Image (cartoon, grey):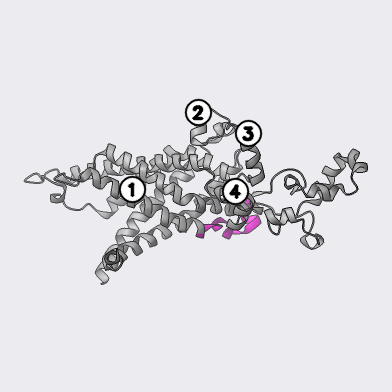
Amino acid sequence: MDELLHNHLFATHAIAASGSVVFATALTYPLDTIKSLIQVGSGSSKQLRASQVINRVQALSGYSGLYSGFEWLAWGRIFGMGARFGIYEVLTAFHKDGREDNYVYVSEALMAGMGAGAVESLISLPFELIKLRAQVTSASRISRATPVTENKAVVPVIAKLLRGYTPDMKALNYSVGMLSILNSKHPNMVGAMQEYPWMMTGSGRPPSVYDVRRPSQIISLEGPGALWRGLHSGVARDSVFGGIFFSAWQLLHRAMLDWKAVGMDPPPRYDEEIGPLSPLAVSLAAGFSGSVAAAASHGFDTAKSRSQCIVLPKFISMERKLLKWKIPGKRFERITGIHPADRNILFRGIWLRMARSGIASFTIVASYYFSVTYLVSGN
């Protein structure tokens, strides 16, 4: 392991791969922001357009709001894609073992890609959750009915669950007014209601997404397990994406090798005798494969994004366990994390995700080839 870390060639490829991932993420991040806001902001009877999302973000956060949460996705992409390609190479090495050439069948690439995608999802989900909530915050109008300075005494229950949060006193007073018949039974109804975590917002609803967007806030209110919210749909998305991406890329790679071998005399026996393919052709094949894989897995991506925008405090999760609350939907929907109410909106923003994945895949492969060539030749 020490020899590997001190290997100059390994360091060169690691730097080139990380830089390519960050560059591609930065190039396509505005498309990801628009896509995510369309997914979480749309309803069965309400469909957002890209122009509406851009205008809202620009009005509330400026054009820099399109890059809200970028650093979280960049780190998630570096670790996640490193795991995706690393696991894929390990799994395909078992298939290639003992063969005369390094050929991998499309079916083998499909299965290896699905396994690699599942591992990638486990690594990248926490980063994507924090990124998504930052994106939603950039398009949210944050207002407080009661300024923080007016709340001299912070309720211990609220401070323990969500530090710095102040309830909406207007909503709280309205809730107390609905229970006015009980005022004679309790001298301080407002204070008593604030002692219950269910009334921490004053209305009985959980806090908004923009109030629970930092890792410390998420862990404090929702628990550490909330960082992997949307796990079922996330694993389904990345498994389908990884399987189709690598199988389509392998199919195109095989077709380009066969095309290049046409007319060679004598006919090549092994792929190594054909020679390397053009970096541009390989990059275009990766971009096309990324777009196809994004289209096939987009429904799961929408389900994951919408589930990650739900704030579910720890006490509500505990209630559901005690009451043995059953997840709604058909068996396939329960397994993949799709909510029945989202059936008609699963493909909102699909063209944006296809464009983002296609451009990002092309950019990663092309910039990686360029970086490796430049770094190796420069040394």
Q: Tag 1 or tag 3, which sits nearer the N-term?
A: 3
**Magenta part of the chain:** 56-71
Q: Residue furthest left?
A: 266
> Which percent across, then down, holds residue 12?
30, 65
Q: Tag 1 or tag 4, which sits nearer the N-term?
A: 4
Q: How many numbered discs sit on the rendered protein?
A: 4
Q: Amino acid at mark 1?
A: Ala
Q: Secondary structure at mark 1?
A: helix
**From the viewer's perspective, is 226 left or right of 163?**
left
Tell us which disc is closer to us: 4 or 1.
1
Tell us which disc is closer to us: 1 or 2.
2
Residue labelled with disc 1: 286
Q: What residue sits 46% from the left and 54% below the top?
A: 28
Kindly identify which numbered label has been placed on residue 53. Answer: 4
Residue labelled with disc 3: 45
> Which percent across, then down, holds residue 325?
61, 33
Q: Secondary structure at mark 3?
A: loop
Q: Does the magenta segment cover residue 375?
A: no
